[in-house]
Image: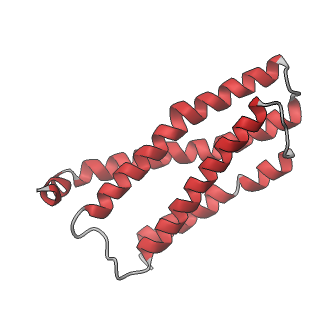
Amino acid sequence: MIEDWLANVYLWDKSLHVISVISWMAGLFYLPRLYVHHTEQTTPGTEMDRVFQMMERKLLKMIMNPAMIGTWLFGLMLTLTPGIVDWSAAWPYTKGAAVLAMTWFHMWLARHRHDFVEGDFRLPGRTYRMMNELPTILMIVIVLSVILRF
């Protein structure tokens, strides 16, 4: 039965979820910083532009995307594990809303990577600096939701 299996792999699932979250968060913190420097220190078509594009592509495709998928997969497994989530409390919903917002931010970053590929440095570095604060705010909401269970 799936519930028994989930209960048996709970500690592995929880560990892999935390590892995935840490990896995803690292990318969510770093990619906007790359965009700041890409915007402010390069021009389209230069060698430095191509280096930034390669770094951004590899970070997104090789680290962030798999980490986001792992976070969602292992997190959903945790929510299905019997006795782990109290659905009558508010915390699963605040955490869920913050995870959805984090996923939106990930997609926003991915969309803006395509702007750089097209040579369209549409947003100023200041915008990426300000957006770089969003994952921190969401992380605080998630951690407080899960630990304090408010």
- Residue 24 seen in this snapshot: yes
Q: Position of residue 44 (x, y in %)?
A: 86, 26
The N terminus - image quarter:
bottom left
- Which quadrant would residue 141 be assigned to in this image? bottom right
Residue at 53 percent across and 61 percent down: it is: 100
Looking at the picture, the colour scheme in use is: secondary structure
User: In the displayed image of the protein, which residue is found farthest to the top?
Assistant: 47
Q: Position of residue 75 (x, y in %)?
A: 37, 56
Q: Is residue 97 left or right of residue 50?
A: left
Q: Is residue 41 left or right of residue 77?
A: right
Residue at 16 percent across and 60 percent down: it is: 3
- Residue 148 seen in this snapshot: no
Vertical position of residue 103 compared to residue 85: above or below: above
Q: Position of residue 89 (x, y in %)?
A: 38, 81
Vertical position of residue 6 compared to residue 84: above or below: above
User: In the displayed image of the protein, which residue is found farthest to the bottom?
Assistant: 88
Asked whether 84 or 45 is in front, the reply is 45
Total marks shown come to 0
Residue at 20 percent across and 55 percent down: it is: 6
Residue at 61 percent across and 48 percent down: it is: 107
Asked whether 149 or 94 is in front, the reply is 94
- Which quadrant would residue 150 be assigned to in this image? bottom left
- Which quadrant would residue 137 be assigned to in this image? bottom right
